[in-house]
Every structure is written in structure tokens, then in C-alpha cells.
Image (cartoon, rainbow, N blue to C red):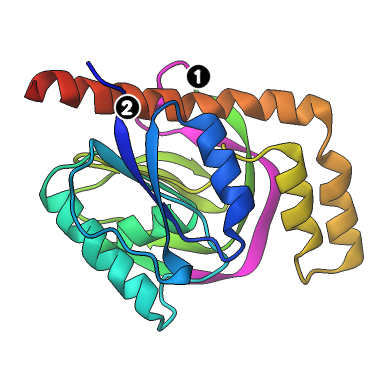
Amino acid sequence: MTRPRLALLNTAHSAQDTSRNFRRELDADLVEFRLTDGDRPEGYEYDGFVVTGSRSAVYDDDEWIRAAEEWCREAINRELPGLGICFGHQLLAGVLGGRVESMGEYELGYRTVERVNDDPVLDGLGEAFLVFTTHSDAVVELPESATRLLENDYGIHGFRDGSVVGIQAHPEYDMDSARLVTEGKSLPDDRIESVLDEITESNYRRACRSKQLFDNFLATVEERQRASA
């Protein structure tokens, strides 16, 4: 069996760090498309796809967001396995009929999320685990056909709908990414400092457990490869 070939829909505006993080965590052949630069996938000859995080909101009136939604809708119709992270989680939920809204606040920093339902993408992660979060929008209503997988006191943190999984947090982040994103937020200095103080080697190592999500997603992609061989 060949290595999985994935379409990486990079929706970040500063795409280099995002590219580095996902290329480090996904043991697959990645065909990257930097959507905010006008790069677009044309076909669907992939074993699966991943939609990254972005500082944009899924409800922004940008052509590249509508193009991403259109491509993902057809990929889902073709039953390609898909993984959405943060913005990607919200975009996939919206494509499938869910609702995304502004939270009116930020969830930022290391937070614990809890398992609500079992799913292969959560194998080995226990009932609760630490993740790094940075978002001010949230999926407030899941698609009718979706199953909630993860949550905390800020709301929905993960879902499954058919071949698609959404994860609100950022398991791909390293410590540099966490610091850079935190320092870029327009929040009170004491809030920023409190989050930066928690970006420690100890917390990062605990949060590395969440990286298992990527291996578990790839396992579902490989299972589909075997089934279609």
C-alpha cells in the first residue's frame, strides 16, 4: 500500500509556520494549497484532505473561503476522509449544515477537553486531555447528522459526520507557534502574560498527547485505501 496522498488546504494568512507544523505531524504525502494566496485544488485524486486553522472567520465574505467550501462539499460527497482543525473544523461544520458564531471572547491557551462519544480518531486519548486553543468563533450548532466527540465549558470541541472529523484545538502547534499566536492577540497584557506563562515544556509535553489525533486520522485514511484496493 502506498503512503496516503492528502490535500492540505492551508487557510493561514502566514502560511509558512502552518505548513511546517502539519508537515511535521502528518506522515503522508501532502499536496499543499495556500488558499489565501489564490491557490486552489482542481480535482479530487487524493486519499483524504486536511483543512488548517486561519485568522479569518468562516462567515467572512472572501472568495477563497467560498471556494474552499465548494471543494470540501464535493470532497465530502465523494466520501473522502477529511480533518478540519480550528477554522477547518468550523468550515466543515458549516458545509455540512451546522452553525458557526462569534463567541464574543477568546478561548486561548492550554485547556482540557473531554470525550463525549467514542470514535476511532480519539483512540488512545482517554476521557480528557490537554490541548492548545486559540479561537473566538465556535460551532454553536452541529449538523443534524453529526456526532459530538469533544467539549469543554467553552462548547463543542470536536465532531464526526460520516468520513469527516472536526477538531477545534491545535494539536499541531509547537511551543513557538503557541507563543507567536498568543503574542499577536489584541487582549489585555495581563491575559497575554498569563497564557505565555503557561507555555512551558511540561504543558507542551502533556498536550503532545493530542497529536495522536493525526495518527488516528491517517489510520482511517489507510483503512479506506485498503478497502478500495
Look at the numbered discs 1 and 2 and tell me whether their residues touch, using CB distance below 8 Å.
no
Q: Residue at x 26, y 20 (%)?
A: 2
Q: Quadrant of residue 101?
A: bottom left
Magenta residues, as a range?
A: 101-125
Which amino acid type is shown beneath numbered disc 2?
Answer: Asp
Is residue 107 one of those drawn in magenta?
Answer: yes
**Considering the image in quadrants, where does the C terminus appear?**
top left
Q: Main secondary structure of the magenta part?
A: strand
Q: Separation of disc 1 and disc 2 at Cα?
A: 11 Å
Q: Does the rendering let one see residue 170?
A: no
Which residue lies most toward the bottom here?
61
Q: Where in the figure is residue 106, as x and y percent of width and height?
A: 66, 62
**Looking at the image, which is closer to me, 120 or 224?**
224
Which amino acid type is shown beneath numbered disc 1?
Answer: Gly
Q: Where in the figure is residue 201, as x and y percent of width and height?
A: 82, 28
The dot on residue 119 is 2
From the viewer's perspective, tell me whether residue 19 is left or right of residue 227.
right
Determine whether the residue tagged by mark 1 lies in a helix, strand or loop. loop
Q: Where in the figure is residue 207, as x and y percent of width and height?
A: 65, 29
- Mark 1 highlights which residue? 126
